[in-house]
Image (spheres, grey):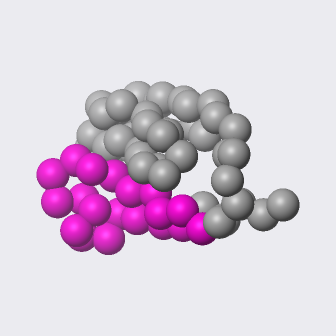
Amino acid sequence: IVMTSDDMMHDFIIDELNVKIPITQSGNTNTVEFTADKVGTFEYYCSVGQHRKNGQIGKLIVEE
């Protein structure tokens, strides 16, 4: 996953898969590479400030 932070600092986390991109400052890019070892639907989110609460979340679906 390649994450570019355009407007402010963000991070990227999927708890169940132990995936984390550290806080990335505005104008920078960070990456994480991982193998999803579980099938299912997993929430990803930004944990900076109130970002998660304000809707910066999504779902990653892993199928067989």
Q: Is residue 23 left or right of residue 17?
A: left
Q: Nearer the viewer, residue 61 or 54?
A: 61
Q: Quadrant of the N terminus?
A: top right
Q: Is residue 56 magenta?
A: yes
Tell me if I can see residue 48 in this picture.
yes
Q: Is residue 17 above or below residue 32?
A: below
Q: Is residue 4 left or right of residue 63?
A: left
- As drawn, which residue projects farthest toward the front? 38
Q: Residue 53 at x, y = what percent?
A: 22, 68
Q: Quadrant of the C terminus?
A: bottom right
* Residue range of the region highlighted in magenta in the rendering: 41-59
Quadrant of residue 41 in the image? Answer: bottom right
Instruction: Kindly identify the residue that appears in the image at 46 percent across and 57 percent down.
Output: 44
Q: Residue 56 at x, y = what percent?
A: 35, 63
Q: Is residue 9 magenta?
A: no
Tell me if I can see residue 26 in this picture.
no
